Amino acid sequence: MCPTTTESTSTTTKSDGLQDSNGRPTEELVNQAASARGFGSPHRPARGHGYEQRGLAYLPVSQLFEGRFGRMFRLPPYVPTKERIDAIAQAMTENASGGDQALNNPTIPAGYTYLGQFIDHDLTFDPVSSLTRQNDPDALTNFRSPRFDLDSIYGRGPTDDAYLYDKRPGFEDMLLIGQHDNEDDLPRNTQDTALIGDPRNDENTFVSQLQLTMLKFHNKMVERVRAEPGIRRGSESVFETAQRVVRWHYQWVVVHDFLRRTVGQEMLDSVFDETGVVPKANLEFYQPRSAAPYMPVEFAVAAYRFGHSQVRGRYTLNSGVQNLATFLPGATTDPALALQQFGGFRILPRFWTIEWRRFFEVDGAGDGELQLTRLIDTKLANPLANLPVEIGGSRPSLIDRNLTRGARLALPSGQDVAAAMGLTPLTDAELELPGGGPAPLWYYILREARVLAQGHHLGPVGGRIVAEVFLGLLTKDPSSYLRNDPTWTPFVESATDTFTMPDLIKASGHGLEVTDLPGR
């Protein structure tokens, strides 16, 4: 019987049945962690890394097995002390220059870091007012199922979120594209705030350019549906057909490109069997009990945060904007710093249109090296230890934030999760954890990737969690291609044997030209 459905007879409490090895109940552990770190239950605005989904703070003391959030493994929690978190966080900073080639991952181009962020925002879209978020324990049961449905692009549709859509004659059914200084940008209001379904997709230059790419891909599909009426199914309108086509191509990319690179081909094949007539997901640990799938905290707070280790400290955007810092504290208030970093929540600067060939294996004009992600390991780029206030709030270290949140959510240790999966846990020597002993699940997953997969993709614990959640959510979604038409395959042109993110970018037409500063 898998750990998700096994109730321990030795760890029953009046709340969620979780105790640590010393018998301390979850309430005590969580309160201790919150008090020691001052982390509490933040409800910052829904933009940046300070954002937290409704209901997450209530999970540790919930009597429910699953709702909006749940647990894949019913294991004793590991709640490190403040001093332990500080020691681990100090050991996780990269402390290297942006040009250190030895830290690059040769198998994953840099754009997949931000595709992963875009996917995360799609899954965790939370269209609820800040007033509701202030005190909302009902979010544990009254929630919107996580889906790969691009609501960060479409919002609630043309009727409810009309500001996202183009009203000009001839542009019906299309999404609104902004423009200034002869460059395309996200649509913005008079104060330069992006008019998009999810404000987090303007957090940095790269994810905002991905958002713009998806807007243009939809518009291209509207044109194609108009030209090829046979694409429409039943009583679908032009918009509904284009939306379905975009979603299904995106879902295909999520599985066959992003997930394959993230977990490795062997892990993907073990979880997703495509050898038969109909593809089948083999889910061993992620098995939602209800029709509405939950978001496992092991995924949301640990495994899927692997992308933080992929972030580079510096990037080259195009032929004219080169080798700038990912983030710089104070850049939003100091005009002298604004054009020295890629922070977002602003109008796209002139000549800052991305050249996607520098981020994905896509054919585009010009020359220049393809940038790579950093290895998946326990070393994070220096800017992530000191985020700008609009992203990190009063807790600028993303490393500290991740470790503390894992403690507050009463996650089990990495060793315990590995054992529950039937795997041999990493040794203290392999973990290289300050002081040895139990490893926070997030740290364990990052280190496992480095030890067992050379940092090229996730290892067996992290890879299994991510693969099962992705495929589980798709198979539970009645509108996904896996449920609606499991034998469907992409029909937009591809340069390879399967449709990938570079193919989507090429079809969108965005970021394929040279963007150079005048006078260079």
Image (cartoon, rainbow, N blue to C red):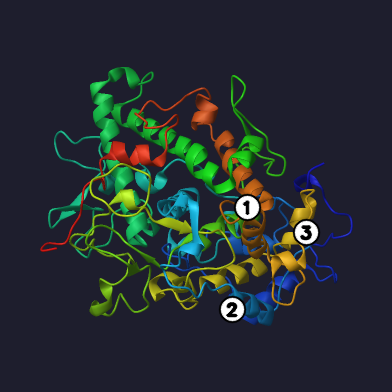
Residue 205, given in percent of the width and then of the height, sits at 32, 60
> What is the quadrant of the N terminus in the image?
top right
Q: Amino acid at mark 1?
A: Ala
Question: Furthest-left residue in view?
Answer: 519
The mark nearer the N terminus, 1 or 2, is 2
> What is the quadrant of the C terminus in the image?
bottom left
Does the rendering let one see residue 158?
no
Q: CA distance from mark 3 to mark 2?
A: 24 Å
Q: Amino acid at mark 2?
A: Gln
Residue 263, given in percent of the width and then of the height, sits at 59, 46
Nearest to the eye among marks 3 and 2: give it. 2
Q: Is residue 51 above or below residue 383?
A: above
Give SS at disc 3: helix
Q: Which residue is mark 1?
A: 453
Q: Which mark is residue 416?
A: 3
- Name the image quarter holding residue 280: top right
Q: CA distance from mark 1 to mark 3?
A: 20 Å
Q: Is residue 343 above or below residue 333?
A: above
Name the residue at 61% across, 70% down: 403
